[in-house]
Image (cartoon, coloured by chain):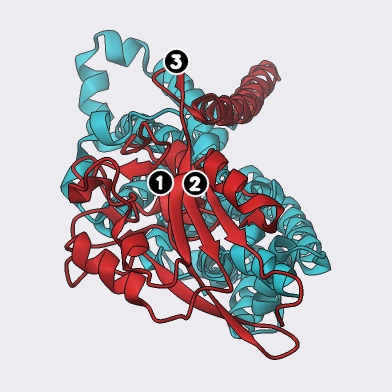
Chain colours: A cyan, B red
Amino acid sequence: MQTIWGWQPALYLFLGGMGGGAFLTAAVLYLRDRTGNNRVICASMWAAVISLAVGLLLLLSELVTPARGLMMWQSFSHFTSWMTYGAWGAFAAIVVFGVSALLATEKLMVPVRKRGGWLAAHETGLRSGLAIVGIVLGAFVAVYTGMLLMAPASVPLWNTPLLPLLFTVSAFDTGVALVEVMAVVAARKDPLGADAKRFLERCVVVLVLLEAVVLAAFLGTALAGGTDAAAATAAASAAMLVGGPLAGWFWVLLVAAGLALPLTVAVVGLVRKPASPSARDAAADTGDGEGTANAATKSQPKRWLPLAGACGALAGGCALRFLVLAAGVHANLASETILRLLG
Amino acid sequence: MEHKNITRRSLLCASAAGAGTVALGGAWGLTGRAHADDAAGTIAGGPVEQYGFLVALTRCSGCGRCVEACRKGNRLSDSTEDRRHVESYTRTRGRTFFASTSCMHCAEPSCMSVCPAGAIWKDERGLVRVDQQRCMGCKYCYQACPYGVPTYNEVAMDKCDGCRSAELDDGEDPYCVQACKFGALEFGPVSQLKATAGDAAVAIAEANRPSCLVLAPEKGVS
């Protein structure tokens, strides 16, 4: 098993992808409806900032000399490395995500709006612009987490474009899941609109199915193996995941919790008859009383169900990074040549 | 309805921008690879006489003196892993052979191209060196090395540099070569090693064009 990169880079790959995906999802929700769901959007943007920041701090703690890592102008100055682009991309992303989150925070913006001035006049335009730039940066961070592993082409399991694709789809999937968690947290004060909710459920179905297909292709290609040492090592790595020492984590956390559970929850949410607008309005108007509880119970799926689906997706996304990293072993190329010479 | 149309347009813009990012990323990746290719075999615009090692399978006894001499000569700290490793290979007909290997000093080192700090370079002999004052220890070079060579101590990345930082005289062989009593290790310009050994010497692998040759057993040696 690969142990040179430990738990910190694995967690960073998850948190970075999830943060990028969560911001992307929140920004899309904002661009779809610039007036609604503000509490969920705000919470999701802050969650994206925190995820990315924690991920970067973990990465820093993995360095032999973290102080040198902070000198970004020196330590990330060699532009033949994907890590250089990733570091600057994550830095730009955290700035844009942070400013967007600040502008989405009502407590900060109410006095700004009262005072008037340039920021108050251009708030919507600025937030829309930042949302679009943030989508680009979020997508870049998501793609980068996979490119980092694929680019050197020296670890056979990682040496396929299916890996960045898998990590990107998973990043979007876990990003949607994080927004769903934020929606459940904010549900009491500002529940997610029915349109946004269905949009997220559709996203989950598409992304989980896509992730399952890409994961199957990724493992199937590796398991097919080949005659050379690299192909044999890729096959051994994939076998480690599906039937070896990592198989329990793979099937329980990644496949069952990360794919099957969120897919089931999203499909149940979509096929369930949508609540009538009058029942929803009644629930929203009457506050936290008994009548609200009854109306909500009848018209909406149980609150824990989407939470369970989202938590499953997050656990699966996290497991994916740990498993792919652990199974990424080098081929013994020298041994292949020497054994051939010896006969 | 109007709001919806504008929203869709915004989303289309965002999608296009996202696709652009991915495309740009790909272009960056290609550019990176091109730079690495340019750097291979040249230094400061001039060609490099690539130095490397020759490992003679039939002469190595597996005694490990090369490993010890390397540690001592380079004054490696206790927390630094061995720079050289001796592995055994057993022939199907029974006899066991040994090979002592270290950094392959590749003509196209991927460790150099993936180092975000630019802390890895090829010197005038084509030897791959690391600036330990610049390395932050991100360990990306280990993942990028097809041979899994780089190790890490409490300071930075560490690996064989042909004893160039051990203050050897220009004509002197590295400590591992000096320590081998059986002539199982040779060091010099790869072209010269090839010419001396003839067809029996082959590159240890293909990835990154390593500067390490293996001298196969002569026919009849079982």
- At x 33% / y 28%, what residue is drawn? A77
Q: Which residue type carries mark 3?
A: Gly
Q: Which residue is tagged 2?
A: A22
Q: Nearer the viewer, mark 3 or mark 2?
A: 2
Vertical position of residue B39 compared to residue B107: above or below? above
Q: Which residue type carries mark 2?
A: Ala
Q: Is residue B209 left or right of residue B52?
A: right
Label 3: which secondary element? helix
Q: Earlier in the sequence, mark 3 or mark 2?
A: 2
Where is residue B188 shown, x and y percent of the image?
44, 46
Q: Which residue is tagged 1?
A: A48
Q: Determine the image quadrant of residue B31.
A: top right
Label 1: which secondary element? helix
Other residues around mark 2 within 10 Å, as few (<14) / some (14–19) / many (≥20) = many
- At x 74% / y 59%, what residue is drawn? A218
Vertical position of residue A338 compared to residue A176: above or below? below
Q: Which residue is tagged 3?
A: A125
The C terminus of chain A lies in quadrant: bottom right
Q: Earlier in the sequence, mark 2 or mark 1?
A: 2
Q: Is residue A198 visible?
A: no
Where is residue A235 shown, x and y percent of the image?
73, 70
Q: Is residue B71 left or right of residue A86?
A: left
Which of the chains bears the disc numbered 2? A
Q: Does the CB distance between marks 2 and 1 fall below 8 Å?
A: yes
Label 2: which secondary element? helix
